[in-house]
Image (tube, coloured by chain):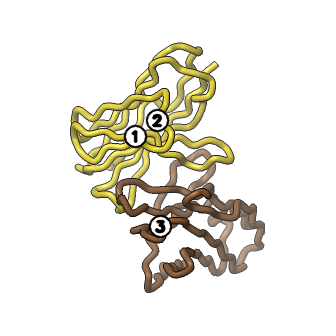
Chain colours: A yellow, B brown
Amino acid sequence: NAGVTQTPKFRVLKTGQSMTLLCAQDMNHEYMYWYRQDPGMGLRLIHYSVGEGTTAKGEVPDGYNVSRLKKQNFLLGLESAAPSQTSVYFCASSPWGGAEAFFGQGTRLTVV
Amino acid sequence: RKEVEQDPGPFNVPEGATVAFNCTYSNSASQSFFWYRQDCRKEPKLLMSVYSSGNEDGRFTAQLNRASQYISLLIRDSKLSDSATYLCVVVGPAGYALNFGKGTSLLVTP
């Protein structure tokens, strides 16, 4: 059972570089989410999607873009990385809004 | 005011103790409520859903008080393996995303 898979698991970027984080789920879930977790801040929602082809902004969307071209994949892009984006990023999916969410193992991103 | 608030702890308790965590939420129209558990450097995992009638799963009991906008988690007979961070999670009225509290840290000691 793969569940929710995130790649990569670790990455170090230089300021100004770009990258894409990939999230894949094999549970046929409609909803997918990207969160970031920082010490003392808890998990904060970056962007989410309620179905294939849809995306919406969460609590902290600035500096990030997302795409959901296929139902099973949700991509998070950083166009020009900044040190403030150093964080642990979690992807999650759920069958519908308000249901239990299943999380990937996280991506630890450091921007230097 | 943050949507979901928890006492960050840490709670240090001996094995076998009973410990209770509380959580308050700000939006009275919130729809769903959960407790998640997060181990160090791991992803959050669902511990249990929280229902208005209260629910129990083994040593864990969750309660919801909609009138006071308050959720609780009771852990009886604590085990060393219960050491983790417990996250209170609330789904707002829009029903699209989970709002997390900052978590309560529990350390169970021998």
Instruction: Identify the disc placed on residue A61.
Output: 2
Residue at 58% in and 15% down: A15
Residue A62 place in picture, x, y as percent: 49, 31
Q: Quadrant of residue A72?
A: top left
Residue B41 place in picture, x, y as percent: 60, 45
Q: Is A10 or B52 nearer to us in this picture? A: B52
Residue at 66% in and 61% down: B104
Q: Is residue B67 above or below residue B5?
A: below
Say which of marks 1 and 3 sits in front: 1
Asked whether the residues under the numbered discs 2 and 1 touch, taking CB atoms below 8 Å apart as contact, a structural biologist would say: yes
Q: Amino acid at mark 3?
A: Phe
Residue at which label 3 appears: B34
Query: On what subunit does the disc labeled 1 rest?
Result: A
Query: On what subunit does the disc labeled 2 rest?
Result: A
Do circles 3 and 2 both sit on a common chain? no
Q: CA distance from mark 1 to mark 3?
A: 23 Å
Instruction: Identify the disc placed on residue A57.
Output: 1
Secondary-structure class at tag 2? loop
Residue B61 place in picture, x, y as percent: 54, 80
Quadrant assignment for the N terminus of chain B: bottom right
Quadrant assignment for the C terminus of chain B: bottom right
Q: CA distance from mark 3 to mark 2?
A: 24 Å
Q: How many marks?
A: 3
Q: Do we see residue B58 in this rendering?
A: no
Q: Amino acid at mark 1?
A: Lys
Secondary-structure class at tag 3? strand
Q: Is residue A1 above or below residue B34?
A: above
Q: Residue furthest bottom?
A: B53
Q: Do we see residue A46 in this rendering?
A: yes
Q: Amino acid at mark 2?
A: Pro
Q: Is residue B103 left or right of residue B97?
A: right
Residue at 60% in and 49% down: A42
